[in-house]
Amino acid sequence: MKNLKKVMLGLLVLSIWLIPTSTLAAGKSIEGITFLDDVEKVEWYKTDGRHIIVGWKGLPEDFYHWNYKTAVKASKLSRQKVHVWSVRYHQKHWSPGEGGQICITTATWGRFEKTNCRKY
C-alpha cells in the first residue's frame, strides 16, 4: 500500500511538471515560424495544437522548401510531432481533417519525416 502511494505521488508530481512544459513548448512553435511573414505568397498562418496551417495565395517555386523549413523549425522548438497543412488562402476557417488541402508535411523533434508536397 505504501509503494502504491509513492508511485501515485510520483506520477502526480511528474504530470504537474510535464503539462506546463508541453504547453510552453507548443507556444514556442508559432514564434519559430515568424519567418513566414516574409514569404511572398503566404497570406496567413495559424496553429491548432500540433498543427500549423498555412494559407497560400499562389505557389512559389520553393514551395516544398518553405513547408519543410516550417515543419522542422516548429517541431524542434515544440519538441513534439508537428503537421504543417498547406491550404489555399481563402480557406481561412479550415481545420485539419477536413480535406481539400494542398499538401501535408510532418516533422518530429526537429527531423523531417514525410511530405506529399511536390517539388516544383
Image (cartoon, rainbow, N blue to C red):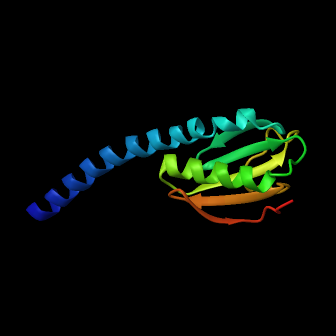
**Coordinates of residue 87 in the picture (x, y in percent):** 82, 48
Q: State the residue in front, 54 or 32.
A: 32
Q: In what quadrant of the picture does the C terminus appear?
A: bottom right
Task: Give the quarter of the image for residue 111.
Answer: bottom right
Q: State the residue in front, 120 or 26.
A: 120
**Coordinates of residue 90 in the picture (x, y in percent):** 88, 39
Left/right placement of residue 92 relative to residue 20 reads right
- Residue 18 shows in this picture: yes
- Residue drawn where x is 66% and y is 37% of the image: 35
**Coordinates of residue 29 in the picture (x, y in percent):** 56, 42
Q: In what quadrant of the picture does the N terminus appear?
A: bottom left
Q: Is residue 116 above or below residue 42?
A: below
Residue lying furthest front: 61
- Residue 1 shows in this picture: no
- Residue drawn where x is 88% and y is 40% of the image: 57
Q: Is residue 22 above or below residue 6?
A: above
Residue lying furthest right: 58
**Coordinates of residue 97 in the picture (x, y in percent):** 74, 56
Left/right placement of residue 98 relative to residue 47 reads right
- Residue drawn where x is 85% and y is 40% of the image: 89
Left/right placement of residue 56 relative to residue 75 reads right
| Number of marks in picture | 0
- Residue drawn where x is 52% and y is 38% of the image: 27
